[in-house]
Image (tube, helix red, strand yellow):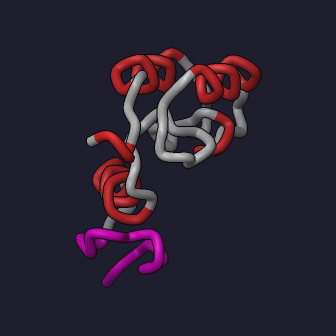
Amino acid sequence: EQSVAPVFDLNNDGQVNSLDVDQWIAEVADTVAGDANLDGKVNFTDFLILAENFDSQQGTWSTGDFNASLTVDFADFLALAENFGFDRDKR
């Protein structure tokens, strides 16, 4: 029996976890971690969004919580830094 809402279990494994986040990023949003505003680029605008919300305990993707931990923290900064310079149109 599945204990999570099926709508959030993107890979249909009966769990909602980082694998579902990874699938959402790559297949639904068509971007990478760090793209807070979902414009297909990881740039200074995304960094400013993360910086403005750093240490927030109510994080969402659009505030810089790229790992779905509900906190905007150093792990999210590292994800942004790893993908800084990404441009969907230039891949």
45 left or right of 14?
Answer: right
- The stretch in magenta equals 1-14
Q: Nearer the viewer, residue 89 or 22?
A: 89
Give the image quarter of residue 65: top right
- Side (left or right) of 57 relative to 71: right
Quadrant in the rendering for residue 53 = top right
Which residue is nearer to you in this view: 16 or 27? Answer: 27
Q: Does residue 47 sit above or below 13 in this rendering? A: above
Compared with 55, 68 (above or below) is below
For image coordinates 38% across by 32% down, the residue present is 86
Q: Nearer the viewer, residue 87 or 67?
A: 87
Our reading of the magenta stretch's main secondary structure is: loop
| Residue 13 drawn in magenta | yes
Q: Residue at x 60, y 33 (%)?
A: 64
Q: Position of residue 67 (x, y in %)?
A: 45, 38
- Which quadrant is the C terminus positioned in? top left
